[in-house]
Structures are given as structure tokens and as C-alpha cells.
Image (spheres, rainbow, N blue to C red):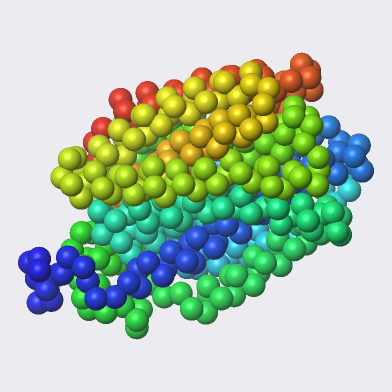
Amino acid sequence: MQPSLQGIDVPVKPKGNIRWTVLIFLLLGGVINYLDRANLSIAAPEMIKQLHLDNTDIGLMGTVFSWTYAVMQLPAGWLIDRFGAKKIYSVAVLWWSVSTFFTGSCSKMGTFLTWRTLLGIGEAPCFPTSAKLTASWFPRKERSLATGIWDSSSKWGPALAPPILVSVMLAYGWRALFYLTGVIGVIFILFFMFFYRNPDKSRKLTPSEMAYIQSDGGGTEENIQTSPISWGSLFKHRTMWGMILGFFCTIWIWNIFLNFLPLYLLKAHHVKLASLGIYASIPWLGGIVGDIFLGGYLSKKLVDKGLTNALVAKRSLITIYAILAGIACVIIPYVQSLALTLTLMTLALAFISAITGSAWAIPGDVCPQSMVASVGAIQNFGGYFGGAFSPVVAGIIADSTGSYTLAFVSGGIIAALTAVFYWFMVRKPIAA
């Protein structure tokens, strides 16, 4: 037993695991979030064929979404910290689900861009909400693993999307992809609104588990008004800028995979559409393993064994994985074998995913709990504001050169620079 907290003994292994069941909501919400953005890459070949679009058009849709998503991170994080995660998240999921549904009714670029813009607005609060709830429900030493699990949703979505959505598209057409994923989101958020409660209001949370969570910084969802740090002053800190620039480098290459992986397999390796669902899902399975085990589990083990503290463990792993991801991405366009290409893509996404999972856990290490959503959202803003341009840049490169080589090479170099920013700039907590 550990020292008591408010008269309750804090066990090493508390009675109760409600905190882990909360992850089911975060994981499912993230999967739906990514299904609703990955459906474009699955529908792209048929949209290009039927609506006479090109790679640049698909890239522009990706860029419009990402840029809107990035800008909306700033108010989203503040709103979550100010009004509560459950309220903002419920509105957000309903908003993005409706936007997804009506994308299926579009036929012209103008309407596509409108609904992709609205999708970006709605999806912005998703991951800052998850970071906020993780800080509320988990002690610091478990947050890296918990974050790796819910952040793996961003890989489960693209992994599940190809086999499921390609089958739906072949049977009912590309528009059905948007209708189906939109309806799924509405059903999910109704369940969330009915069943979720914050830890201080949960009837299923045992006193033992609550004491365990509170013993290392969790247990409540603090309001931004209680923070000793103002929102605007966050931008004065070197650590904050290291997170912004480092995440930019990661999301640049991430968005290339998210928007063009299926098209690359179709055009560079002549994969048949009927087989695309299986092949396009394989690399994302590597992302799931990377997020949970290379990032979350390994970071937790380093801390549990007393080898380092939580922040240094994450920074060290991010540095190593960024370099490895960059190398894998640079090599991808130079291999001719489909099997080797899929292997390199799987490794690249495993390393990139380990970075994103670790990065999303860092806000809980470097700022007060009342600011976790804001700091996480600002980091995500940096990633997607810059990374928003990678899909359209990659699309222009592919259309003008007839190849994705330069897109992957430049993306790999940018990905490797992630190591520089997280290792040299994210060195200490953000203090008042």
C-alpha cells in the first residue's frame, strides 16, 4: 500500500478499472473521427472517374479540411477547458457526422469544399477532448499507455476503412461511404451523452480507484479559469513552440499517407480495386502496434523501471522514431516490390504513430491539468496548420511529375526533423 490520500489508502493496484473502460468511448470516437476523414481517400478513385476530378482536386479537399481543422484547434481547446469536455465533444461529434453525411450528396468542387470545411470545424475538438479526459481519469504514470490506446483510433480508422468501405462502395457506390459513416457517428454520440460521467460524478468509480487516480494528478476536470497560466502566455514558452514545430513535421508526412496511400498503391503498383481494401489496410496495422506498444507501453515501462521520468521517456522515443520514420519514407518510392513497399509503409506508420501517441501524452506532463486541452490543441494546431499543405503539395507533385517520389522523399526529410524540435526544445514544464 502507498500513503493514504484523504483517509483512503492508495493501493499499487486499486480495486476497479472504470478508468480503462472510459477508453472505449475515446477509442470508438477516434475511430469514427478517422473513418469520416479517411472515406475521401477510399472514394477518391471513383470520384475522379465519375466527376472528372484529378489528384490536385483530392489534395485540395484534404488541405481545406486540414487547414480548417488546424485553425479550429485554438478555440476548441479553450472551449473544452472552459465549458467541459462532454458538452463540447457531444456538439462536435453531431456536427461532423452531419457534415460527413451531406458530403455524399455533392457533385461539384464548391460543395465538396464547403462540407469538408464544416467537417474540419466539427472534428477539431475530438483529440483535445481525449487528452483532457485522460488527464482527468488517469494518474500521470499511466497516461502514456492510455493515450497510445485512444490515439491508435487514428490508425484503426484507416485500417478498418479500406476493407469495409471498399466493399460498401463496390456494392452501393462511393456516396454510400459518406452516408454510412455519418449515421454511425450520430448513433455513437447518443450513447456517449447517455452513459458518460466525469470521474467526480461517476457512481461506478470505487473510492480505491479514485484515490489511486488522485494520487498522481488526476480525478477532476479542472476549469481553465483556475489555471495560474493564461491561454495567451502559452505561446511565450519554448516548450510550446517545440511541440508546435515538432508536430508540424510529423503531420506533414502523416497527411500524405492518409490522403494518398490507396492512390499510390493503385498507380505505382497497379493494385486492383477489388484488392485495394486489404492492401491499403496493412500499413495502418503497423500504426496500431506502434501507437500502443512502441509509444505508450514502452514509455510506461521506462518510467516503471525508474530509468527516467515520463517527459524524458517520451522525448527520447520520439527522437528515435522520427529518424527511423524519415529513413523508411525516403526509401519507399525506390522499391519495386509490392511486399517490400507495404513493409516499409507499415514500419513508417508504426514509427509515426508512436510519435503522435507520445506527443498527445506530453501536455499532461508539461502543463496544469486545467490547460491540458488547450496545450494539446495548440500542438495539434501547429501540426495541421503546416501539414494542411502537404496533401495539395503531394497532389501537385504527382500531377506534374507523374510520380509520388519527391512527395515521399521530402516528406521523409521533414518527418526526421521532428526529432530536432522535441529533443532540443521540449525540455521542461510550462510554468507560471
Whether residue 28 sits left or right of residue 337 in the image: it is: left
Name the quadrant of the N terminus. Answer: bottom left
Q: Residue at x 34, y 35 (%)?
A: 317
Estimate the x, y position of residue 51 in percent, counting from the top left.
91, 42
Specify the quadrant of the image occupied by residue 95: bottom right
Taking 7 as reference, is 375 above or below it?
above
Taking 109 as reference, is 204 above or below it?
below
Estimate the x, y position of residue 91 in percent, counting from the top left.
58, 65
Res. 383 visible in picture: no
Q: Residue at x 53, y 54 (%)?
A: 153
Q: Nearer the viewer, residue 321 or 391?
A: 321
Res. 301 visible in picture: yes
Instruction: Name the outermost residue toward the bottom.
Output: 203
Whether residue 233 sits left or right of residue 24 in the image: it is: left
Q: Residue at x 29, y 75 (%)?
A: 16
**Count of labels in the image:** 0
Name the quadrant of the C terminus. Answer: top left
Whether residue 13 sits left or right of residue 65 in the image: it is: left
Specify the quadrant of the image occupied by residue 302: top left
Estimate the x, y position of residue 287 in percent, counting from the top left.
51, 43
Taking 129 as reference, is 117 above or below it?
above
Taking 354 as reference, is 334 above or below it?
above
Estimate the x, y position of residue 303 in percent, counting from the top left.
22, 46
Whether residue 161 sits left or right of residue 417 in the image: it is: right
